[in-house]
Image (cartoon, rainbow, N blue to C red):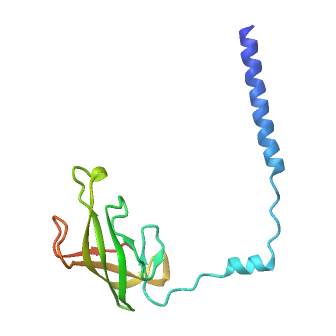
Amino acid sequence: MRKVTVRAALTFCAAVSLATVMGAADAAPMASPRSAHTVARESMQPPVPTQPVIVDCFRHPQVEPGDYVLACGDGNSRLTSLRWSHWGANSAVATGINAVNDCKPYCAAGTFRTYPVTVRLDRPQAWKNNPQISHYTRLTLVYTDTEPAGYGQTVTYPLAN
């Protein structure tokens, strides 16, 4: 008798699940035809920046960002409070703060320490994701006071394409 009850219960549950899925599919609204306004809006592309950009960790082009993550993998180094004095065809210059995790005793329990920096971007090249856009490919930090342990006063990073 127990096998019949379990089999009946499983059959009932499967039938209810199938009916729920089918009912949800039948109840789904049909896509409405796109209006001329919708088609026109979808075909519009955002304007292509005329100056180079810096590409963030999410592959979004940025112009004069206020913040920028240097360590995309773990976020343990980032630039904050950026104030741009120059953003041009060949280079860009800002002052700001580099917040660096000291990772003591380990990174998850570490403390972010802040260091004033001058930031320089240069070496613009066509961006592989959108060759119409030029992006800076090198970032240089100059620590204007003290620098994090193990860093030099000037540190240069390649920026990924």
At x 45%, y 89%, the residue is 51
Using the image, determine if residue 106 lies above or below residue 3: below
Apparent side of residue 100 relative to residue 18 in the rendered image (left or right) = left
**Which one is in front, 64 or 46?**
64
**Which one is in front, 123 or 74?**
74
Using the image, determine if residue 13 lies above or below residue 33: above
**Which one is in front, 38 or 144?**
144
At x 66%, y 82%, the residue is 44
Residue at the limit of the structure toward the top, as seen here: 1
Total number of numbered discs in the rendering: 0
Give how far across and how far down residue 95 sits, in percent.
Answer: 30, 82
Give how far across and how far down residue 25 sits, in percent.
Answer: 79, 48
Give how far across and how far down residue 141 sits, in percent.
Answer: 25, 77
At x 25%, y 50%, the residue is 106
Give how far across and how far down residue 6 sits, in percent.
Answer: 72, 17
At x 41%, y 77%, the residue is 66
On-image quarter of the N terminus: top right
On-image quarter of the C terminus: bottom left
Using the image, determine if residue 17 lies above or below residue 66: above
- Residue 13 sits in which quadrant? top right
